[in-house]
């Protein structure tokens, strides 16, 4: 089973992934961008906002996704794979391009292979403001609250628009309640 956890920065993905790692010890845990050796370099390019062109940024994500699919998803298809982000984030962050085009490019990068289950942790504006104020922001987070909320809405639209099994959770819910919802969804 291929499971992805989506959400904008500070939504609590890392916390829930740590919990899942303690429960699913045989699962393969990965992330996009950065789940492969090449991906680590590409991730640094994205987070440092080195690409000035939106097209270049989108293709960096796509290069990472294709490499990640080849090295992680395809070679481990008989295992449980749990990923911190996926093509859904890539499509959301490529918000300046037509959705249909970005979906097609991602389908190529993924050889038309999509997650079996998608979990999205969603933040309300006031909670996002609070969480961002508690940390130093990277190049993506520095684009602002409205930008992140727009990305979050696009993630939700992509998830709801595709024929995928998904669960959207209010990220301000207590951690242990989120944990139970996720585990029920994975095992259900």
Image: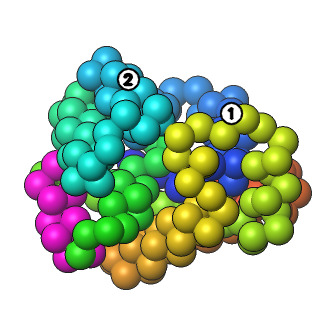
Q: Is residue 1 shown in magenta?
A: no
Numbered disc 2: secondary structure: helix
Q: Position of residue 120 (x, y in %)?
A: 58, 62
The majority secondary structure of the magenta stretch comes to helix
Along the line of sight, the residue nearer the viewer: 32 or 72: 32
| Rendered image: mark on residue 18 | 1
Q: Position of residue 121 (x, y in %)?
A: 65, 61
Q: How is the image coloured?
A: rainbow
Extreme-front residue of the structure = 52
Along the line of sight, the residue nearer the viewer: 163 or 134: 134
Residue 48 drawn above or below residue 5: above
Residue at 36% of width from left, 68% of height from top? 95
Highlighted range, magenta:
99-109
Residue 41 drawn above or below residue 55: above
Residue 148 drawn above or below residue 21: below
Residue 18 left/right relative to 118: right
| Rendered image: mark on residue 167 | none
């Amino acid at each position: 089973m291929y499971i992805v956890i989506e959400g904008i920065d500070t939504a609590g993905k890392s916390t829930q992934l740590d919990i899942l790692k303690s429960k699913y010890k045989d699962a393969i845990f990965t992330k996009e961008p950065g789940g492969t050796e090449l991906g680590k370099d590409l991730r640094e390019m994205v987070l440092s906002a080195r690409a000035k062109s939106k097209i270049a940024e989108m293709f960096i994500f796509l290069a990472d996704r294709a490499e990640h699919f080849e090295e992680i998803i395809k070679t481990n298809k008989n295992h449980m794979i749990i990923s911190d982000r996926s093509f859904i984030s890539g499509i959301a962050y490529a918000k300046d391009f037509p959705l249909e085009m970005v979906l097609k490019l991602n389908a190529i990068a993924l050889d038309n292979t999509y997650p079996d289950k998608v979990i999205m942790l969603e933040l309300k504006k006031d909670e996002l403001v609070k969480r961002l104020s508690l940390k130093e922001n990277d190049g993506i987070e520095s684009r602002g609250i409205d930008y992140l909320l727009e990305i979050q809405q696009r993630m939700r639209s992509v998830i709801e628009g595709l024929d995928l099994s998904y669960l959207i959770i209010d990220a301000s819910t207590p951690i242990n309640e989120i944990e139970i919802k996720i585990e029920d969804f994975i095992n259900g």
